[in-house]
Image (tube, grey):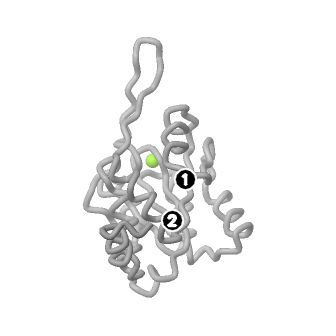
Amino acid sequence: MKELVKKIKILISDVDGVLTDGGLYYNDEGKVFKKFNVQDGLGIKLAQMAGLDLVIITGLKSEAVKARIKQLGITEYYEGFLKKDHLIRKISKEKNIKLEEMAYLGDDWVDGPPMKLVGLPMAVKNSQPEIKKIAKWISQKKGGDGALREAINFILSTQGKLEQLWEKWLNQKF
Ligand SMILES: [Mg+2]
């Protein structure tokens, strides 16, 4: 497991049920609201600092998600992709990064094919049972409750980068 995690260069994450709790709040005008976790936000920054690439892929299209992604400074955001495995193969070729060097964090059946493809399939605690079965790592936190941060911390700490990052952070060496 440790050797496998050390190879990871990209973490790909789903949005609904991973970055959010899966809840869709509708107002009277039919507008959808979603809740994100601020600790995931800082985790994304930490990943960027440590050189762990982050790619976000969602099957849905949402202005709320787009706004949050922009705020976090994520440039690799793909929306409206239900066949995520095809997209991941494409990203792998374009970036010249092997599938085994990729991690994928998901929660539901649409995440199954991409999880089967990558080196490190990861699932949030409240994933569907089939998804948990194919995951090599499962978070303690639920989706939307800091599960992405936990996944990032796990990868960075296994790669021996988290402690350095913390020291730098404490000493404001950025
Ligand atoms: Mg999902």
Is 91 displayed left or right of 58 in the figure?
A: right
Against 27, residue 166 (above or below) is below
| Residue 106 rendering spot, x and y as whole percentages | 44, 56
**Sequence-first tag of 2 and 1:** 2
Residue 130 in view (yes/no): no
Report if the CB atoms under discs 2 and 1 are less than 8 Å apart.
no
Q: Residue at x 55, y 52 (%)?
A: 74
Q: Which residue is mark 2?
A: 11
Q: Which residue is mark 1?
A: 56
| Residue 114 rendering spot, x and y as whole percentages | 56, 62
Q: Residue at x 41, y 48 (%)?
A: 19
Amino acid at pointer 1: Ile
Against 11, residue 57 (above or below) is above
Q: Classify mark 2: helix, strand or loop.
A: strand
Q: Residue at x 37, y 65 (%)?
A: 151
Q: How far separated are the C-alphas under marks 2 and 1?
A: 9 Å
Against 134, residue 124 (above or below) is above
Query: Which quarter of the rendering shows the N terminus?
Result: bottom left
